[in-house]
Amino acid sequence: MFQMSLTAEEPKPAVEARAAGFLVYKIDENAKANEANKVQFLMMRASYEPFHWTPPKGHVDGTEKPLETALRETEEETGFAECDLVVDSQFERVGFRVSEKKTRRPSNVRAFLR
C-alpha cells in the first residue's frame, strides 16, 4: 500500500550567503588624464563556468567580519597581504545582491576599495 501526503510544506526561506572582497585598483601616474587605462582594476577569472571576471572576494567564515574576509580572500587569491594594500575606509558598498544558480540562494556581497 502506498501512502501520499496532501499537505504542503511551507517553503523554507533561503539562507543568505555572505561574501566580501576588495576592488583593487592602480592609478598609472604616467598616463594622460584622458587615457582609458589610467585606472587599472585587478580582476580574477572564475575557475568555474561561465568563467566570468570578478574582483577577489569570498565567503564570510563564521563570525568573521567582512573586512577580515576581504583581506583574507585577497591574500589567498592574489598574494597581496594587508601591508600591500591601502584601504579606503570611507568606501564600503553593502547590499550588492546576486543570485547563485547552483544554490538558488541570494548573496550579499560587501566590497571595499583598496
Image (cartoon, grey):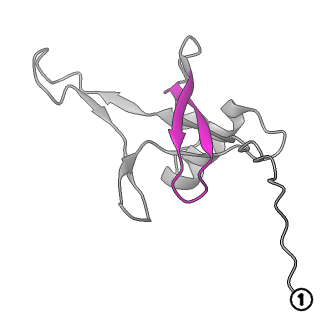
Question: 37 and 50: which one is in front?
Answer: 50
Question: 89 and 10: which one is in front?
Answer: 10
Callout count: 1
Mark 1 neighbour density, 10 Å: few (under 14) some (14–19) many (20 or more):
few
Residue 2 image offset from top left, x and y in percent:
85, 84
Q: Residue furthest top?
A: 90
Q: Is residue 33 above or below residue 18?
A: above
Name the quadrant containing residue 13: top right
Task: Name the residue: 62% across, 47% down.
Answer: 105
Question: Which secondary structure, mark 1?
Answer: loop
Q: Callout 1, which amino acid?
A: Met
Question: Is residue 105 one of those drawn in magenta?
Answer: yes
Task: Name the residue: 55% across, 23% down.
Answer: 87
Task: Give the overall secondary structure of the magenta segment.
Answer: strand
Query: Quarter holding the N terminus?
Result: bottom right
Q: Is residue 93 above or below residue 74?
A: above
Task: Name the residue: 14% across, 24% down.
Answer: 31
Is 30 on the left-hand or right-hand side of 21? left
Residue 70 image offset from top left, x and y in percent:
61, 38
Name the quadrant containing residue 109: top right
Question: 29 and 18: which one is in front?
Answer: 18
Q: Which residue position is annotated with label 1?
A: 1
Task: Name the residue: 69% across, 32% down.
Answer: 66
Q: Which segment did they paint magenta?
A: 94-114
Q: Residue furthest bottom?
A: 1
Question: Is residue 87 one of those drawn in magenta?
Answer: no
Name the quadrant containing residue 50: bottom left
